[in-house]
Amino acid sequence: MIQRIQTVFLIIVGLLGAVLPFVFSLWTDVNSNVVFAQNEIYILVAFLVSAVLAIIAIGLFKNRKNQFVVNRLNMILNLFLLGFFVYRSLNLSGESNISEKGIGMLIPIVSIVFLVLANRAIKKDEDLVKSVDRLR
């Protein structure tokens, strides 16, 4: 059903991926240029794909197993995005191009938390349906 709590969590993930990267900066470089998601095309695509996967997961409310799998894929995408941010902020060459980190780097962490909460609610619904089927 669409009025479940996991729908609320997935809507939050969709908003996190579609709106907040345009509002909060990701980092400020050495030349004091503020970098947003739209300045880096790969980051923008990753955020938008995350939002689209959350919306697709909302549409899969009748098939909880597929919804669970789509949420897992979304978590993996956000982990890659988070890994990229960590790599970018801790540049391996020793010379950092990032002088100040922005709050936008925390968006994948918050998305992962809400995706875990949504998957927990989906699992709870699946267990409830299995227990009712067992009684028949």
Image (spheres, rainbow, N blue to C red):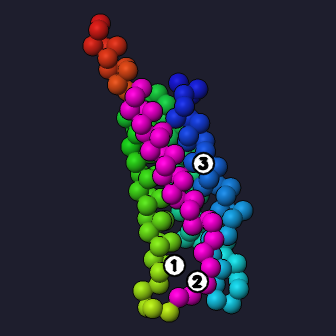
Which stretch appears magenta? Answer: 96-125
Point out the tag, 2 or 3, that comes first from the N-terminus: 3
Point out the tag, 1 or 2, that comes first from the N-terminus: 1
Mark 3–mark 1 distance (CA, rounded to whole Å): 25 Å
- Residue 126: where, in percent of width, then height? 37, 27
Secondary structure, mark 2, is strand
**Residue at image location 67% in from the left, 70% down from the top:** 25
Secondary structure, mark 1, is helix
Q: Residue furthest top?
A: 136
Q: Which residue does the numbered mark 3 point to in the structure image?
A: 14
Mark 2–mark 3 distance (CA, rounded to whole Å): 27 Å
Q: What mark, if any, has residue 72 been given in the picture? A: none
Q: Which residue does the numbered mark 1 point to in the structure image?
A: 89
Q: Which residue does the numbered mark 2 point to in the structure image?
A: 98
**Residue at image location 57% in from the left, 48% down from the top:** 13
Q: Nearer the viewer, residue 20 or 56?
A: 20
Please name the amino acid that badge 3 sits on: Gly
Give the number of the mark in front: 2 or 3.
Answer: 2
**Residue at image location 45% in from the left, 91% down from the top:** 94
Hey, which quadrant is residue 48 in on the image?
bottom right
Crowd rating for badge 3 (residues with CA inside 10 Å; few <14, some 14–19, many 20+)? many
Crowd rating for badge 1 (residues with CA inside 10 Å; few <14, some 14–19, many 20+)? some
Q: Is residue 56 at all visible to an observer of this figure?
A: no
* Looking at the image, residue 22 lies above or below residue 17: below
Please name the amino acid that badge 2 sits on: Ile
Q: Is residue 89 at all visible to an observer of this figure?
A: yes
Give the side of residue 75 with respect to residue 49, left or right.
Answer: left
